[in-house]
């Protein structure tokens, strides 16, 4: 392996570690939140506010941080971001009430918002287009792995040493990674594309306008919102479906959902390889792979939802296949963004994309799916001749058997939106070739060949 290839692999390993800790730290609170709720006598609404505030600030702050990644050293942006979120993760363990924890979680969101734009832009300059889907798939594997490992370790640490210790311990590897990223070196912008920037960075507003003039980018932004709606809906309610509808206890249901995320995420690697191979044949290849994978997810989840009550492992099997297809989205679509965006604008492009992905997808997915579930549970009760009432706080009061039916039926929103996502990705695949051609044409005046 050549020296540049070794350097790129080492940098990718550090970036994978940073993304792993990004999602590891994010998952600690959901794991220990019941302990916090009991100690501080919080409501589920309070816990929901902690998650919603994190996502909203993460989405909004990500835009200026993405711009910073385009005009500053990305390794410095990452080091600062990882340091901030690691310190405030540790500070979460020192929180003494809801307000103090709320402030800490806001700070964690600010730090973590630096990760994806800067890391994705850096990967784009380390790996050539024909290898980029695989590199981004490795980076994004930190998402499910971080969530899964945190679910196991944070819970175990909390049971043995208290919930505060789960936050303290998580800060240590983050701080080490913040130091490590300073030693991997900054890649020159456009090097992997054989292009070198020949102009000064555009003003912020001009950068946004330049990103949003690409038709493919609009389709990809819409796809991100739809895909994140689905993934956050599943992430929030998958374990509950297994517990309620398939009558598994909490520990076994957690294991079943963990298997879905863990084994399903392996689809990222296959899609990364297929995406790169397809791109070598035609520019639209990555998006076509993603489109085909999401199309396959539809029958898989429909078969899973058709599994009768009391068969959790059959259900989990089909959900593994579903998530394997859904996880194909990440490496292929993230790489497609870099196929149409100049190196000097990639941080901004990823930040704008993440803004919509989280604000419209991650925020709405759990809330909308929960509302649909409550409505269908109330309907199921009424059809059975049983009254379904709501408390003053809006909480549905109905028997568990109707809650199980309502949530199971609400899950059909996922395959329905997968169909929408297939259409959106297909439209993106039809637009990407023209946008790629326009990028190369602009490169003749704004960039010069690196060779």
Image (cartoon, helix red, strand yellow):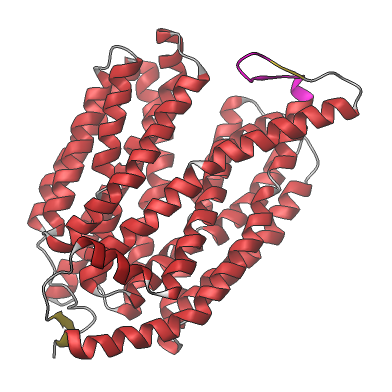
- Which contiguous range is marked in magenta? 391-401
In the image, taking residue 262 as reference, residue 379 lies left or right, namely right
- Is residue 400 located in the magenta-colored stretch of the structure? yes
Residue 132 location, x and y as percent?
A: 33, 72
> Is residue 54 placed above or below 202 in the rendered structure?
above
In the image, taking residue 137 as reference, residue 254 lies left or right, namely right
Residue 272 position by quadrant: bottom left
> Residue at 39% of width from left, 74% of height from top?
214
> Residue at 41% of width from left, 77% of height from top?
276
Residue 165 location, x and y as percent?
A: 28, 21
Residue 402 visible (yes or no): yes
Q: Camera-side residue: 135 or 220? A: 220
Secondary structure, magenta segment, majority class: loop
> Is residue 10 placed above or below 191 in the rendered structure?
above
- Is residue 272 located in the magenta-colored stretch of the structure? no
> Is residue 258 placed above or below 387 in the rendered structure?
below
Q: Camera-side residue: 320 or 331? A: 331
Residue 116 location, x and y as percent?
A: 30, 54
> Residue at 33% of width from left, 45% of height from top?
60
Residue 270 visible (yes or no): no
Q: Which image quadrant: the C terminus?
A: bottom left
């Amino acid at each position: 392996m050549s020296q540049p290839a070794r350097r790129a692999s080492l940098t990718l390993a550090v970036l994978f570690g940073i993304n792993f800790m990004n999602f590891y730290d994010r998952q600690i609170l959901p794991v220990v939140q019941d302990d916090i709720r009991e100690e501080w006598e919080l409501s589920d609404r309070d816990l929901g506010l902690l998650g919603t505030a994190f996502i909203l600030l993460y989405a909004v702050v990500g835009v200026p941080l993405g711009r910073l990644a385009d005009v500053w050293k990305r390794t410095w942006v990452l080091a600062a971001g990882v340091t901030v979120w690691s310190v405030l993760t540790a500070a979460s363990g020192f929180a003494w009430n809801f307000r103090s924890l709320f402030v800490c979680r806001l700070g964690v969101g600010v730090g973590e918002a630096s990760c994806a734009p800067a890391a994705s832009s850096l990967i784009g300059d380390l790996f050539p287009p024909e290898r980029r889907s695989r590199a981004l798939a490795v980076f994004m594997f930190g998402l499910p792995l971080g969530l899964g490992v945190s679910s196991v370790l944070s819970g175990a640490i909390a049971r043995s040493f208290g919930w505060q210790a789960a936050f303290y311990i998580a800060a240590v590897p983050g701080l080490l990674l913040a130091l490590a990223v300073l030693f991997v070196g900054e890649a020159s912008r456009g090097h992997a594309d054989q292009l070198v920037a020949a102009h000064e960075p555009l003003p912020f507003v001009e950068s946004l306008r330049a990103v949003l003039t690409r038709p493919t980018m609009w389709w990809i932004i819409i796809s991100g919102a739809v895909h994140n709606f689905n993934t956050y809906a599943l992430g929030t309610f998958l374990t509950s479906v297994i517990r309620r509808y398939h009558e598994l206890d909490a520990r076994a249901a957690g294991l079943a959902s963990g298997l879905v995320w863990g084994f399903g995420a392996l689809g990222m690697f296959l899609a990364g390889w297929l995406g790169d191979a397809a791109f070598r044949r035609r520019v639209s290849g990555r998006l076509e792979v993603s489109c085909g994978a999401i199309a396959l997810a539809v029958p898989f989840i429909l078969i899973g939802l058709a599994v009768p009550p009391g068969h959790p492992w059959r259900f989990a099997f089909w959900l593994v296949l579903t998530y394997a297809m859904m996880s194909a989205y990440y490496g292929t679509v993230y790489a497609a963004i870099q196929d149409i965006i100049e190196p000097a604008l990639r941080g901004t492009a990823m930040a704008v994309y993440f803004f919509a992905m989280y604000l419209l997808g991650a925020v709405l997915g759990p809330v909308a799916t929960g509302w649909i579930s409550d409505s269908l549970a109330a309907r199921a009760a009424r059809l059975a001749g049983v009254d379904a009432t709501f408390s003053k706080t809006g909480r549905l009061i109905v028997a568990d058997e109707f809650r199980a039916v309502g949530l199971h039926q609400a899950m059909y929103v996922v395959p329905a939106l997968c169909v929408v996502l297939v259409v959106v990705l297909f439209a993106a695949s039809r637009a990407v070739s023209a946008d790629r051609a326009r990028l190369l044409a602009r490169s003749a005046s704004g960039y010069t060949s690196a060779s």
